[in-house]
Structures are given as structure tokens and as C-alpha cells.
Image: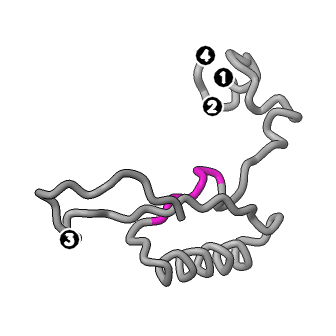
Amino acid sequence: MIELGTMSKHQSEKDLLTIALAQIAQVWLNKIKTLDKICSAISEVAAQGSQLVAFSEALLPGYPFWIERTHGAEFDSATQKVCLGIT
């Protein structure tokens, strides 16, 4: 957990929001165990006083790296346009 900034004389403790940034890896192709890791991370930072925790956008279900290797992320693909009915 990272604390940034200071409280001004016009602020009170209730005006502050403590945010944690979690950088954890998913359990490869295992949603339940990944959710367990997420819940553990939330509990850990909550015990340290955090009120909000942010995770990476692809933590659950994981980043689909295979899309690029199978040309599923190919820009302006004629094959994808046919499959999606965008012709």
C-alpha cells in the first residue's frame, strides 16, 4: 500500500481515501484459485487500512496472449469480418 500526499488543516480523516494497488499474477487458467488470491489481497490491504484496492484489468480471467498468436487480434482482418458478419 502506498500513501501519497498530506492532509491539509482543512481536512479531516474522514475526507481521506486510502487506495491500494495490487499487482498479483493469476493462477494459470484457474478462475477459483485466482479469485482466492484476489480475496486474500483484498483482506490483506483492508487490514492495513485501505478502503479501495485496484487490480490490473486482465487479472481475471487472465490476459489471452494466444489471441495474438492465432491472429485473433489482427487489425482489419478479412477473416474476422466474415466470421462476425462485418463485410
| Residues at circles 1 and 2 in contact by the CB criterion of under 8 Å | yes
State the separation of the CA atoms marked 1 and 4.
6 Å
Q: Which of marks 3 and 4 is in front?
A: 3
Q: What residue type is labelled 2?
A: Leu
State the separation of the CA atoms marked 1 and 2.
5 Å
Horizontal side, residue 56 vs residue 8: left or right: right
In the rendered structure, find residue 14 and report the number of the disc placed on it. 3
In the rendered structure, find residue 87 and report the number of the disc placed on it. 4
Q: Count residues near mark 4 (Cα–Cα under 10 Å), then give few for <14, some for 14-19, many for 20+.
A: few
| Residues at circles 1 and 4 in contact by the CB criterion of under 8 Å | yes
What are the residue bounds of the magenta stretch?
A: 53-58
Q: Nearer the viewer, residue 55 or 76?
A: 55
State the separation of the CA atoms marked 2 and 4.
8 Å
Q: Count residues near mark 2 (Cα–Cα under 10 Å), then give few for <14, some for 14-19, many for 20+.
A: few
* Type of secondary structure dominating the magenta stretch: loop
In the rendered structure, find residue 81 and report the number of the disc placed on it. 1
